[in-house]
């Protein structure tokens, strides 16, 4: 049995998936995090308090995504689910393509692993498998779990990942609009088949993007070209489409962040990022928040929370 009063603190970064051509494969962790404290209580059931993003909007009982993710792990490893108090401090915008749902899932998985430390062993593959069971795709949860740039894929043994270090010159800019986008709607706009030449185009750009992010940031503009998903989704978020088009017309490596509607600009140095942010303000006005972020290299962390 887990001792009543045991408390763990989890920090999970935001993420940006796809990165242009790397559809459902590439993801980047961003230094903009949610923090969650989970405490085992004497009483059964789950209570959740939320400050910051989602306060007054997200569920505050056992249906909360963090709580459901914790329960999923306990059920999968055959451990009794205890009473819990969950205190969430959220910064990651919801419904904006910055991995908020993936972060909540990873928060729950990591909290469960911390509560079960010494009872159940969790290696990287197991954590990724548990998070992917809930998320459905590993490309968002992999960078949230492990940090940096991740390549995610599914094998016969389950989801896998490779973490890569990002070139120190890469300077991400995230432009967050004041409107949301449904991931389900965005995915519904994807065709079941694409032209052969578009598939080949994206394979080449995805390979080039790995080189650009890890070794040659000067190649980021060409490496972020995409023909698989962004054009098809553009009609559902025309302001995002226009922001990406305006930035790219000026030579900046702008892409849709995840399913959108946020825009990720991968700049080769901080000076270029400042110039891109200035242009974005001209294009979008006050309706877009500019986040100049570092790449998160650690990924999710869990530790015993101080009393």
Image (spheres, helix red, strand yellow):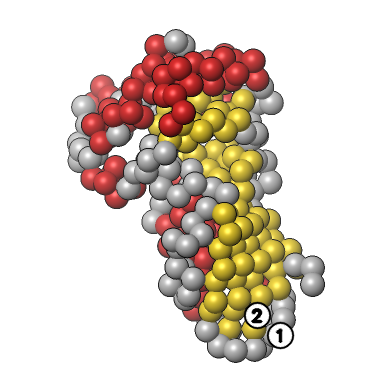
Disc marking residue 40: 2
Q: Residue at x 66, y 75 (%)?
A: 39
Q: Position of residue 84 (x, y in %)?
A: 59, 78
Give SS at disc 1. loop
- Closer to us: 95 or 281: 281
- Is residue 279 shown to the viewer in this render? yes
Q: Quadrant of the N terminus?
A: bottom right
The answer to whether residue 191 is left or right of residue 215 is left
Which image quadrant is residue 79 in?
A: bottom right
In the image, residue 83 above or below residue 141 = below
Label 2 to label 1, Cα distance in Å?
7 Å
In the image, residue 157 above or below residue 22 = below
Q: Give whichever of discs 2 and 1 has the lower sequence position.
A: 1
Q: Residues within 10 Å of mark 1 (few under 14, many from 20)?
A: few
Q: Quadrant of the C terminus?
A: bottom right
- Closer to us: 138 or 306: 306
Q: Position of residue 281 (x, y in %)?
A: 48, 21
Q: Residue at x 41, y 48 (%)?
A: 95
Q: Position of residue 174 (x, y in %)?
A: 52, 32
- Closer to us: 10 or 213: 10
Give SS at disc 2. strand
Q: Position of residue 3 (x, y in %)?
A: 71, 85
**Do callouts 2 and 1 mark residues in contact (Cβ within 8 Å)?**
yes
Which image quadrant is residue 245 in?
A: top left
Look at mark 1 in the image and give the residue it sits on: 3
User: Residue reaching furthest right?
Assistant: 307
């Amino acid at each position: 049995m887990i001792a009543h009063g045991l408390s763990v603190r989890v920090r999970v970064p935001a993420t940006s998936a796809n990165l242009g051509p790397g559809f459902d494969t590439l993801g980047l962790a961003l230094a903009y995090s949610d923090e969650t404290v989970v405490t085992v209580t004497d009483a059964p059931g789950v209570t959740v308090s939320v400050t910051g993003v989602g306060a007054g909007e997200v569920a505050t009982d056992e249906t909360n995504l963090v709580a459901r993710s914790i329960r999923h792990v306990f059920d999968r490893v055959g451990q009794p689910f205890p009473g819990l108090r969950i205190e969430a401090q959220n910064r990651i915008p919801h419904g904006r393509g910055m991995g908020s749902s993936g972060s909540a899932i990873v928060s729950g998985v990591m909290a469960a692993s911390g509560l079960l430390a010494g009872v159940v062993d969790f290696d990287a593959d197991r954590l990724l498998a548990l998070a992917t069971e809930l998320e459905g795709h590993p490309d968002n949860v992999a960078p949230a779990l492990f940090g940096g740039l991740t390549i995610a894929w599914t094998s016969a043994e389950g989801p896998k990942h490779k973490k890569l270090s990002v070139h120190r010159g890469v300077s991400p800019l995230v432009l967050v609009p004041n409107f949301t986008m449904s991931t389900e709607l965005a995915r519904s706009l994807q065709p079941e088949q694409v032209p052969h030449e578009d598939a080949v185009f994206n394979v080449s750009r995805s390979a080039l993007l790995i080189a650009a992010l890890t070794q040659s940031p000067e190649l980021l503009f060409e490496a972020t070209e995409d023909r698989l998903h962004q054009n098809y989704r553009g009609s559902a978020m025309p302001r995002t489409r226009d922001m990406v088009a305006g930035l790219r017309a000026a030579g900046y490596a702008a892409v849709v962040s995840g399913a959108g509607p946020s825009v990720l600009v991968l700049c080769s140095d901080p000076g270029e990022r400042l110039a891109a942010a200035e242009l974005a303000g001209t294009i979008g006005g006050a309706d877009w928040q500019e986040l100049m972020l570092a790449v998160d290299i650690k990924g999710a962390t869990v530790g015993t929370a101080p009393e």
